[in-house]
Image: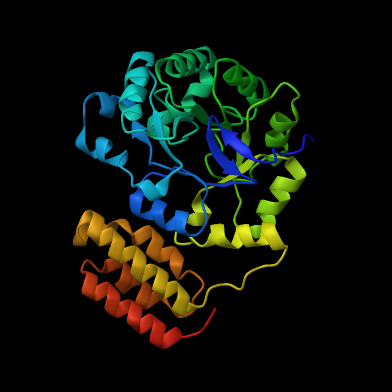
């Protein structure tokens, strides 16, 4: 197994030793959550998925997805689509926002995207994937990266060859989710295949692994066993932005940080919801956080009724009052 890079770089973007990436996730990785994850140690963050078709039509919602604050850097905009001309134009539009990286999504397994040949659906048309990627690399000056999967299905796990070909057309890093498109998010991520890409002597660019990393021990295993240059974390960050801090500490010291107490979690949620309301307005900001609310307190017992009230709240005062109740009732419970 090749040793991971001492200090990972994407183009001129310095990411240090064994960096951690926040995975792009629709309706999750908005600017507020990205900033929160950066505070807890995420080395690089990305937008939600941005449709190339929507960008060239100047759809306001998609344009807003690309907005970011200076403290989010290094920062990537991720685009997806299935038409070369639209993808190239979308990349140029994204470049005007001055991101550090433009990432191409060849990994989203959602049926409505993959069935029309975008996202992981592009794994069924590798020549077009390469054509689109090369055209984008030539069209923009910022580093271009790709996020993809092992292959379309169990009979077509061709990521070792695809990674080489993507490198040859000019991408500067690749992120690999250790499942096929057909698996969606079921089963177990196959890190052995991610390791095969990293150990391929022809690979010169950084290889970032993604899939099932849910804590410090798993992160360290993936770095040490598979030699990846970086790790991208997705679903395990929802309602758990402090996962980055815990992994960083363990990688540096070999010691596990104690799990946050309920009081500490409440403080994080207060900050998260206040930032969301400031950014999106009261109702929209609170509704956007419902996926996070469900995860922040997932380990509390006898929490069902309180969880329902929290998920149904639409006013900031109401949310803050429920959080106060949680702090008083569950106190210092870890």
How far across and how far down the image is residue 102, in percent?
A: 43, 30
Residue 156 in sight here: no
The quarter of the picture where residue 171 lies is top right
The residue furthest right is 1
Left or right of residue 150, residue 325 in this image: left
Residue drawn at x 68%, y 57% as measured from the top left: 251
Residue drawn at x 48%, y 22% as measured from the top left: 122
Which of the colour schemes (rainbow, by chain, secondary structure, one colour) is used?
A: rainbow
Q: Where is the N terminus found, in terms of image quarters?
A: top right
How far across and how far down the image is residue 4, in percent?
A: 72, 39
The quarter of the picture where residue 267 lies is bottom left
Q: Where is the C terminus found, in terms of image quarters?
A: bottom right
How far across and how far down the image is residue 10, in percent?
A: 55, 32
Residue 228 in sight here: yes
Left or right of residue 321, residue 258 in this image: right
Query: In this orientation, which residue lies closer to the viewer: 156 or 75?
Result: 75
Residue drawn at x 26%, y 29% as measured from the top left: 54
How far across and how far down the image is residue 112, in percent?
A: 37, 32
Q: Is residue 192 above or below residue 153?
A: below
Left or right of residue 90, residue 130 in this image: right
Query: In this orientation, which residue lies closer to the viewer: 275 or 182?
Result: 275
């Amino acid at each position: 197994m090749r040793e991971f890079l001492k200090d990972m770089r994407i183009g001129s973007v310095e990411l240090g030793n064994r960096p951690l990436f926040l995975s792009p996730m629709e309706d999750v990785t908005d600017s507020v959550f990205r900033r929160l994850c950066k505070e807890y140690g995420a080395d690089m963050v990305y937008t939600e998925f941005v449709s190339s078709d929507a960008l060239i039509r100047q759809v306001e919602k998609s344009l807003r997805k690309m907005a970011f604050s200076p403290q989010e850097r290094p920062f990537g905009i991720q685009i997806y689509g299935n038409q070369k001309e639209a993808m190239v134009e979308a990349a140029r539009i994204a470049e005007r926002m001055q991101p550090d990286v433009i990432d191409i999504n060849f990994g989203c397994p959602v049926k409505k995207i993959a069935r029309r040949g975008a996202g992981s659906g592009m794994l069924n048309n590798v020549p077009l994937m390469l054509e689109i990627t090369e055209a984008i690399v030539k069209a923009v000056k910022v580093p271009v990266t790709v996020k993809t999967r092992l292959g379309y299905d169990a009979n077509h796990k061709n990521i070792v060859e695809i990674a080489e070909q993507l490198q040859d057309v000019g991408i500067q890093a690749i992120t690999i989710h250790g499942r096929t498109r057909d698996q969606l998010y079921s089963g177990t991520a196959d890190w052995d295949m991610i390791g095969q890409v990293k150990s391929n002597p022809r690979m010169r660019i950084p290889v970032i692994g993604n899939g099932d990393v849910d804590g410090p021990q798993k992160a360290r295993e993936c770095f040490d066993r598979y030699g990846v240059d970086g790790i991208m974390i997705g679903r395990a960050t929802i309602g758990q932005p402090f996962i980055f801090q815990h992994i960083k500490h363990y990688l540096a010291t070999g010691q596990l940080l104690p799990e946050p107490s309920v009081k500490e979690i409440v403080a994080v949620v207060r900050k998260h919801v206040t930032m969301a309301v400031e950014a999106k307005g009261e109702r929209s900001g609170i509704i956007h956080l419902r996926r996070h609310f469900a995860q922040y307190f997932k380990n509390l017992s006898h929490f069902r009724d309180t969880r329902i009230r929290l998920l149904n709240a639409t006013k900031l005062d109401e949310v803050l009052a429920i959080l106060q109740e949680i702090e008083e009732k569950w106190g210092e419970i870890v």
